Image (spheres, rainbow, N blue to C red):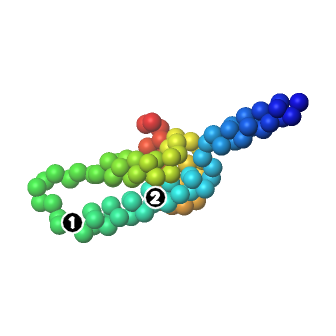
Amino acid sequence: MSKKFLAVGVIALALASCGGPGAEEYNKAAQVICDCMAEKNAEAAAAPADDSGFDLDMSELDYSLCALDAVLEARVDMSDEQMQKSMESTCPDLADQHAEYAKGL
C-alpha cells in the first residue's frame, strides 16, 4: 500500500515539475523584449542619416530578434495569452507590435 502512495507521489511530483512557464517567466521575457527594443531603438537613433534613398523599417526584424532572445532566455511561448498580458503590463508601447508578431506564429 505504501508503495502505491510512493508511486503516486513520484508521478505527481514529476507532473508538477513539468508544468509550463508561469507569470514570472512571461514577465521576464517581456522585460527582455523591452530592454532589447530600447537598445535597438537607441542604436537606430544614433545611426547616421541614410541618404541612399532606401528607407528601411527594421522594427519587425528587430522585434523578431528580441523575441528570439526572450524565448531562449525565459523559455516561454510567444503566442500564449499570458505573454500578451505581460507585454501590456511591462511595456505597453510594444503590446500592439507583440500582438501582430504573435499572429504570424
Q: Is residue 6 among the parts visible in the rendering?
A: yes
Q: Nearer the viewer, residue 56 or 35?
A: 35
In the image, 3: left or right of 78?
Answer: right
- The reply to whether callout 1 and callout 2 are in contact (CB within 8 Å) is no
Query: Callout 2: helix, strand or loop?
Result: helix
Q: Position of residue 55 (x, y in %)?
A: 20, 53
In the image, 19: left or right of 11?
Answer: left
Q: Position of residue 72 (x, y in %)?
A: 44, 48
Q: Is residue 99 above or below residue 91?
A: above
**Mark 1 burial class by Cα count in 10 Å: few <14, some 14-19, many 20+:** few
Q: Earlier in the sequence, mark 1 or mark 2?
A: 2
Q: Residue drawn 15% across and 60% down?
A: 50
Tag 2 residue: 32
Single out the residue that lies furthest toward the right.
Answer: 1
Q: Quadrant of the C terminus?
A: top left
Tag 1 residue: 47
Q: Quadrant of the N terminus?
A: top right
Query: Mark number for residue 76?
Result: none
